[in-house]
Image (cartoon, helix red, strand yellow):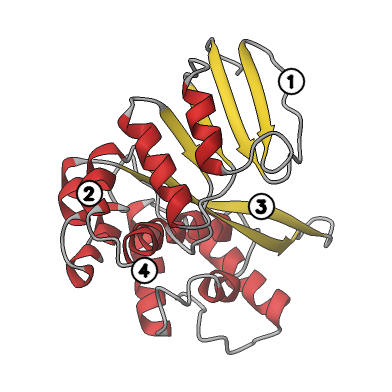
Amino acid sequence: NQNSKGHIITIEDPIEFVYPAWTCLITQREVWENTKSFHSWLMDALRQAPNILVIWELRDEETIRIAIDAALTWHLVFATFHAWSAVETIEWIIERWGWWDIKHSLSEWLVAICAQKMIRYKDIKTWNYKKQTAIEYLWKSQAVESLIKWPKEQMKQINSELLRNPNVSLENSLFKMVFEWKISYSAAFNDMKNKVKKIEDFKERIKNYIENNSIDKRLIEICNRIEVELWEWQNSPFIIK
């Protein structure tokens, strides 16, 4: 809407924000108010020559089918989904209803997944609480396309693809916030507990991040001090030496 021209159609429940039309024509529709269901909306939307379809939320099997069907007709589809990470999004879509035949369509038509987590932190300059979004990006590659078709146990290997450019892992987003002095090691660990449960593994990942990004020793010392000041842990297990 800022950089290209086209027709954007949205389906929302409810409409929370009215988007200004800058370079695109934007048509916003609300479930029950302007259409009977997501499915009837899709049939109507495709007759209006859209370039981009925006689906408010993938709540159930029918809505996911609609999103996939729209992508199959070569439309760019944006949709939101409640999941912890990019990999969990893929797993949840595939397994929620045992809909295994979606694997081929998902692997072929997926463009990217952006997982977002709102992080609350204490500004060390003002000591006021603020919020920042930690983001995980997963772009489709040949490796990701193949892994989506594998069994669940092997699908976990997609996590390793997050460490390769241009992908961005949640843990790297959190570590970046640590060395920007926004959150402590402990806060980063708490937001990664679903992936990293052992403190030793967490510290090893921090050390790898420090080495890969050439973090200065002075910054590490400041982060250690923040860990003590924010959590009052003189002997915190997260202190990096």
Residue 43 has which mark?
none
**Where residue 87 sits in the image (x, y, percent)?**
35, 59
Identify which residue, 49 or 228, lies in the foreground: 49
Report the amino acid beneath label 1. Pro
**Pointer 1 residue:** 20
Residue 205 has which mark?
4
Report the amino acid beneath label 3. Gln
Give me the residue at 52% from left, 12% from top: 4
**Where residue 180 sits in the image (x, y, percent)?**
60, 53
The disc, 4 or 2, on the residue closer to the chain's N-terminal end is 2
**Pointer 3 residue:** 132
The disc, 3 or 4, on the residue closer to the chain's N-terminal end is 3
Q: Residues within 10 Å of mark 1 (few under 14, many from 20)?
A: few
Identify which residue, 240 or 102, lies in the foreground: 102
Q: Residues within 10 Å of mark 2 (few under 14, many from 20)?
A: many
**Where residue 125 sits in the image (x, y, percent)?**
79, 55
